[in-house]
Amino acid sequence: MILHEKPLNVKQKIKKKLNDGNIYSYLKESWQLSWPMLAIMFFEFAMSMTDIYIAGRLSKEVQAAVGIATQVYFFFIMIGYAITTGTVSIVARLFSADEPLRFKQAIFTSVVSACVLGIVASVGGVLFSRALLDFMNAPPEIAVYAVPLLKIYAIGLFCHLIYVTLNGILRSCRMMKLVMKIVFLSAILNIGLNILFVFYTPLGFRGLALSTTVSIMISFVISSKKVYNLLEKTYSFSFSLLKSILKIGWPSAIIAGSWQLASVLIYTIITSLPDSAEVIAATSSVVTALTDNTSTITTILSDNATTVTNAVSNSTATIAAAAYATGLRIESAIYLPAFAFNMANVTIMGNLMGKKMYEEAYKGVLTTAFISVTINIVLAVIVLLNAETLASMLSKEQAVVDEIIIYLYISMIAEPFIALNLAVAGGLTGAGDTRATMLYSVVTVWIFRIPVAYFFGIVLQYGSAGIWFGLTIGFFVQAVLTFRRLKSRKWIKEIL
């Protein structure tokens, strides 16, 4: 007699499918690595939001200056990813491959290289900060605040670049919780010092940059001690490992540098927006009076002085720059899970590649990407439903609040695609396949995002809304290209 198994219901079939595909184990590992990174991202988000909130309490000019200065600052920080990205991939593999000497050599080589890069970036930041602002066409009312902020940021660049590499090393060794605690300390210090320096010392707005510099320096010291313990007095520099690190890292550095340069150019496009009709009309009245009727100069100047002052202070460029700086901070809250899963995938893929478990690595990245996109969609909906409340919390001027809302409505469309791209790109980075992601990033930024933003915003004169729309286009293309690369499994052939 043949006994037939009882048919499974839908719930049991789904559970069996998940178990057969080993999805639960991928979910568990992904979450174990991702939640500390999510906390790290949240702490960094809290720091940036504190900066922009306090700047908004001072004035929209300071708020716009903070946005521009931090973009330039992070342009230099992103250069450090040439070392950090390669470091995370190589150290993660050596950590799981049981090669202690090469493992320590990779750490020492990375730290020394980061020190050299830090010196160059710090000196360059101090010397060329004003030139960069001129290149960005920063309005005088914004540049007067941005220049001193950049000078202070540049002083801390040396420590910050090394700090980024040190934390990358700790993440590669699965010390996510330790990194989380260090970043938490940095966030608390930054927020507390922000309030102290800005409101209770003569530093004023300069305290926004100094608080960041001081908190990073203290965290740098702590991270240095932890990484020093990993070396166990093995101070051996390896040019072959440096070559491997840079081979993986330089495409990521191009991506990061390209992205930050694009961010700088976005501000240049924003500051190229024409002034409002109110400015033009008021200024024309004054010019006409000076030309046609000298006897009425005093009267006309008196009547128009207030109008001109108010119009200039509310110029389209300044409002858009302040709104963009603030909107990016709100948007960065949605990026938190995506970046956390991106960094987790770098470690997951790197560890599994070291064990030559290629198919498991592929499935792990897909699982993490699915979680990332789902969370990102939920957060985007929450932001859309509360856009006005969030904007009002971060700016006291209605014109800026209105512009922030427009920015959020447009930018939220691209959030799921950003999450997908970040998660998959993290996996490819962990596998060492960074050249393809570099190509996709550069193409989408320089063929789609920047040109389209300029075309819609400036050429077609759709204003800031045209710029915001143009900036979302590239994310769709990049997500599709990156996902196709992962699915093709060509990254396995590259490693082999």
Image (spheres, grey):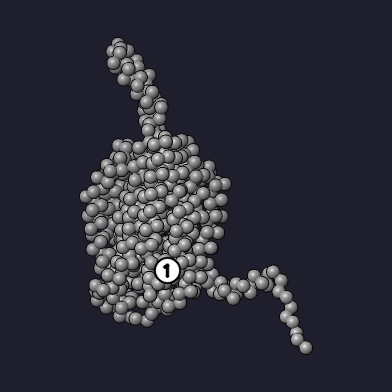
Residue 268 placement: quadrant:
top left
Give coordinates of residue 80: x percent, y percent: 31, 61
Q: Residue at x 44, y 56 (%)?
A: 478
State whether residue 184 appears in this view.
yes
Give coordinates of residue 371: x percent, y percent: 53, 63
Q: Nearer the viewer, residue 286 or 432?
A: 432
| Mark 1: few/some/many CA within 10 Å (<14, 14-19, 20+) | some
The quarter in which the N terminus is drawn is: bottom right
Q: Residue at x 46, y 39 (%)?
A: 465
Q: Could you tell me which secondary element the residue under label 1 belongs to?
A: helix
State whether residue 194 appears in this view.
no
Q: Residue at x 71, y 71 (%)?
A: 9
Residue 17 located left or right of residue 366: right
Give coordinates of residue 183: x percent, y percent: 40, 62
Q: Nearer the viewer, residue 25 or 432?
A: 432
Give coordinates of residue 399: x percent, y percent: 46, 35
Q: Residue at x 35, y 39 (%)?
A: 271
Q: Which residue is mark 1?
A: 490
Q: Residue furthest bottom?
A: 1
